[in-house]
Amino acid sequence: MPQIGLFASWFVFNGWQASTIGANNASLSFQLTMNSSVMLTAGLLGLVIGVVGGALPAFSATRLPLTVALRARG
């Protein structure tokens, strides 16, 4: 399923351009380019966040007695 998010972000943001005008008419412009290394980094970062986000509650749940864990709904 993470591929859906990667391809959706590639479809939306690849080639996206933005520019700003700041003080003293200073202009800053940039263009986003989604290449394979950016997509690989984003995919791995999402995987790490998902594993850490799922592992921390799982480790805390293993410390609870079974009867307490079954009673604590909500």
Image (tube, grey):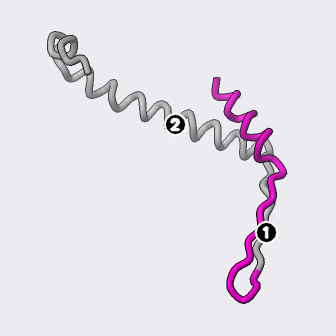
Residue 32 place in picture, x, y as percent: 78, 55
Which quadrant, please, contains the N terminus?
A: top right
Residue 14 place in picture, x, y as percent: 81, 47
Give the residue at x 35% y 32%: 56
Give the residue at x 67% y 33%: 5
Check if residue 16 falls in the magenta segment. yes
Helix, strand or loop for disc 2: helix
Helix, strand or loop for disc 1: strand
Disc nearer the start of the sequence (1/2): 1
Q: Which residue is at the front of the view, 24 or 48?
A: 24
Q: Which residue is mark 2?
A: 48
Give the residue at x 80% y 51%: 33
The answer to which image quadrant residue 52 occupies is top left
Q: Amino acid at mark 2?
A: Val
Q: Amino acid at mark 1?
A: Ser
Say above or below: 30 vs 38.
below
Residue 22 place in picture, x, y as percent: 69, 80
Which quadrant, please, contains the C terminus?
A: top left
Residue 39 in the figure: left or right of residue 16:
left
Q: Which residue is mark 1?
A: 29
Range drawn in magenta = 1-26
Residue 5 in the figure: left or right of residue 33:
left
Residue farthest right in this picture: 15
Spatial CA distance of label 1 from label 2 is 32 Å
